[in-house]
Image (cartoon, grey):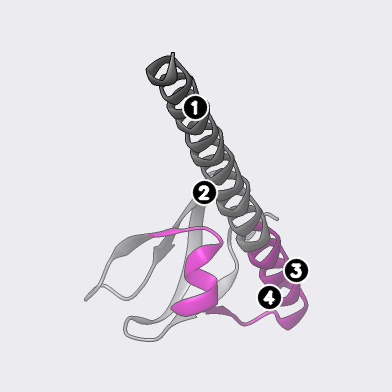
Amino acid sequence: MKIINKEIKHVLFGEGEVVSQEAQRISVRFSEQYGIKQFVYPDALGKYLKLYDTDLEMVVMEELHCKQEQIKDEKERRQNQYDESIATEKLKLKVEKKKISRKSKI
């Protein structure tokens, strides 16, 4: 969602305006005292920034929710992959122990 030129409020820096936007970063111009600051998009909108346009804020929050779900799914996928590799290694060790046990009986 494009939010360039939209008014925004930061919890510390106060009111500002989005002056540029990249895939995962936005730049916001605040008062002269603070200047231009960069934030991770859309993550910062869930914590530090709030758009004045409530309809747009809802859309961005949905983007944030989707991103968080993707991260959660990826973590679960990696954990499952790790668990499967551990189980495979344990099975290999068990098989090796049985082979050694059979050889020692002969």
Residue 84 image offset from top left, x and y in percent: 59, 40
Question: What residue is pinned by disc 4?
Answer: 57
Nearer to us in this view, 47 or 4: 47
Instruction: Say what amino acid the circle numbered 4 marks.
Output: Glu
For the residue labelled by badge 2, is the local secondary structure a helix, a strand or a loop? loop
Distance between mark 4 and mark 3 Cα atoms = 5 Å
User: Could you tell me which residue is drawn at 52 percent across and 26 percent down?
Assistant: 95
* Category of crowding for the residue at label 4, using alpha-carbon neighbours closer than 10 angstroms: few (below 14), some (14–19), many (at least 20): some
Instruction: Say what amino acid the circle numbered 3 marks.
Output: Val
Instruction: Say what amino acid the circle numbered 1 marks.
Output: Lys
Nearer to us in this view, 10 or 60: 60
Q: Is residue 38 left or right of residue 96?
A: left
Q: Which mark is residue 24?
A: 2
Question: What residue is pinned by disc 3?
Answer: 59
For the residue labelled by badge 1, is the local secondary structure a helix, a strand or a loop? helix
Whether residue 39 is visible: yes
Distance between mark 4 and mark 1 Cα atoms = 61 Å
Say if the magenta span includes residue 58: yes
Q: Are marks 1 and 2 in contact (CB under 8 Å)?
A: no
- Nearest to the eye among marks 4 and 1: give it: 1
Question: What residue is pinned by disc 1?
Answer: 98
Whether residue 49 is visible: no
Distance between mark 1 and mark 2 Cα atoms = 53 Å
For the residue labelled by badge 3, is the local secondary structure a helix, a strand or a loop? helix
- Nearest to the eye among marks 1 and 2: give it: 1
Distance between mark 4 and mark 2 Cα atoms = 16 Å
Residue interval drawn in magenta: 39-67
Return the disc, 4 or 2, that comes first in the chain's sequence: 2
